[in-house]
Amino acid sequence: MKSIEIDERGGSVAIPIPRADWQSENERFRIGVRARSFVPSFPRTNDADSMTNHQALPKPNAEVLRKMDDEALITTFQSGDLDVYRYLVERYQERIRNLLFSIFRDRDFIDDLAQEVFIKAYQALPHFRFEASFYTWLYRIAVNKSRDELRKKKTRRFFSFQTLDEGIEKELNVRLSVQPENRDTQELVAMGLKTLPEKFRTAVVLKDIEGLSYEEIAEVMQCELGTVKSRISRARAMLRKALKPLMEEV
Amino acid sequence: MKKMNEQKLDALLSQYVDGVLSEQEAQQVESLLAVDTSAKQKVVELKNLKRLLALQPKLNPDIGFWTRFSVAMEEQKEEEHNLLPFPRKFIPAITVMATAIVVIIGTLVIQNRIQLKQFLSTKSQAVREVYEKNILQGSLLPLFSKVDKEHALQFSLFGTLPLDDKSETAFRVDEQSEKGYRIEVGNNLKSNTKSVTFDRFVAEVKPSVKQKKIIDSLLELTGRRIESSVLIGENNTLAIAPDLPKLNRLMVTNIASCLEPLQRVSFERLLEANNAPYKVTVKSVQTGKAGNYVQNIPKFPQGDRFVIITPDTMMYSQIHIDFDSLKRQMEENFAVVGVRRAAMLKKIIAREFQRVPKNMHFPMTNQIFGGEEFFSVEINAPGEEDNQQQMRVVVQPRFRKQIFTPGMPNHSTQMRIWKDTASSDITP
């Protein structure tokens, strides 16, 4: 990791922006044009030694970068400092992991998928246009990724002649039939979620587990607001039906 | 309808639980809940469901996520720079497989090396046979197999060249007209020109040793050029280099350029005495070294553009032939090639071209004329006037009333080339 130096003299903030080896001159130029006002016109260099020559500038403070909002970090990233991506990952890694966990309920599988989401976001971040908030954009990538993965699983199940959904429904009914004191409510709810079709499951997870608003869900799932309301309503209806004994008990 | 209403009610209650309804809509729902116990039960269940979902366990924070992610990123970057058509992780397996394949192939080659050698030898022999067959039995052969110094001189001075050992055929250039050249092959054509041997030329002109060497070189070059300029082939095909008629005048010019003024006078007397088609005039009295006056020595080989003449048509075409290889092969199979060439020439002259109607017009301003025992082809070709203007020695056509006398009883075969002579000269 390259160190980041920040110059706060005179109320301005100067961030040395080393150019990544793989980054082309054209990309630098394009990114440079797009840079926001808070990004200083610091001499850009890809020479690591020359970075240390700026002794007059204070050393970069990771804490300052952590306090930057998403937009500022993304702008810095787009200006050439790719290392700030770490702070975006650290900020959203748990949310993405939990979103994927809520959808898939598979701990071993979640981390690999979360990595793929962040790699995809890293590749697409230079083209991020600030038309949506970063986290809805990131959620969109995660939802698309999970959708692809669910389709793959469905295909694999088809070719392996498995009927996983039917099995889950049967198992759910068996577990619901036991005495209430012996039930694991959280596991039953998780199983109930698994019985839902992907688009309903994702909608209800985003609403009731992740706490997104209808508008944000529409943005993440790239559909109309009315569609989101309908999906959530239907998902809840399906869940109430699947978890009927649990609902009555509660 | 009831189902639709139930769905609408579910959606309304779901949004009511989420608190996203307007104040008016919320009041309507609350009024409904006051009277409808089932709706009220749904709201309870929805609230319970929301609470259960919100209580779903979260994953413990993963402090090593970034470390693993950065490693995955590095691997991703390496894959992006990977020029191999497969992921890097497969390199060891593919290396092992490639090594195994090489070992297997090597073992097979070693075990079957004798058979392999025989196979390659057979194939190379077959290729050689195909090449030789194409060269020796191809559709085109040089009309003039060996043009020596005497024949080259004959062609240079008089535009005639024997086609066979008996010297019953001739090759001639005439420039009495102003446009085009004409090539003629036929019987009963006789030239009234005399032949001049090289010894006679030396005796008359008396060139120095150096001049003689230059003239020898020019004649040798001319001979090779003639050999590669006229081809005959199967199916009555004749291929002639379109710039061949220029060679005659150029050679007279070059020979005259090598000579001193007095020698040039002797040369002109020799040409005049033997009724040569060209006369030599001197543009100025400047003198210089003889070698410097040799102009535009024909390069060998010339371009591969030929006029292809068949009984049906005439066209320009590119013929790519390695004449050196062809000549070597012909020398090795001299008798066979000679017989084939004689047969081709006989076939051309004897029958096919006699069928061509008189004054039949062909594309590219070329014409073929047919007679009883000959045929002639007229080709428009640009002159060498510009070059002539720049040369100290100028060669001009000598006026002659009649050069060719068709219909003589000796039945000789002649190929004649001249520049757009009157039609009476070529048509009996």
Image (cartoon, coloured by chain):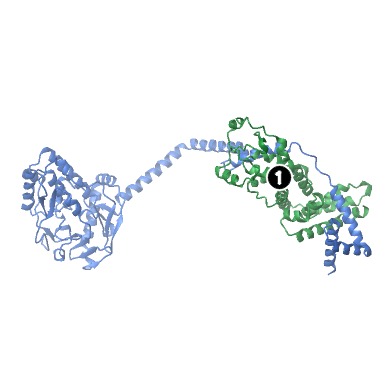
Q: Quadrant of the C terminus of chain B?
A: bottom left
Residue drawn at x 58%, y 33% is: A47
Residue density around tag 1, few if under 14, some if 14–19, many if 20 or more, within 10 Å? some
Whether B417 is drawn above or below B297: the answer is below
Q: Which residue is mark 1?
A: A70
Residue type at mark 1?
Asp
Q: Nearer the viewer, residue B59 or B97?
A: B59
Is residue B120 rendered to the left or right of residue B43? left
Residue B312 locus on image (x, y percent)? 28, 64
Whether B405 is drawn above or below A87: the answer is below
| Chain that is coloured green in the picture | A
Query: For residue B172, which quarter of the picture?
Result: bottom left
Q: Nearer the viewer, residue B51 or B336?
A: B51
Q: Quadrant of the N terminus of chain B?
A: bottom right
Q: Nearer the viewer, residue A184 or B233?
A: A184
| Chain that is coloured blue in the picture | B
Residue drawn at x 8%, y 51% is: B271
- Mark 1 belongs to chain: A
Residue B366 locus on image (x, y percent)? 24, 63
Looking at this rendering, what residue extends furthest in the front direction? Answer: A10
Is residue B359 rendered to the left or right of residue A149? left
Looking at this rendering, what residue extends furthest in the bottom direction? Answer: B1
Q: Is residue B427 visible?
A: no
Is residue B176 rendered to the left or right of residue A24? left
Query: For residue B427, which quarter of the picture?
Result: bottom left
Residue A134 locus on image (x, y percent)? 71, 48
For label 1, the SS is helix
Q: Is residue A69 visible?
A: yes
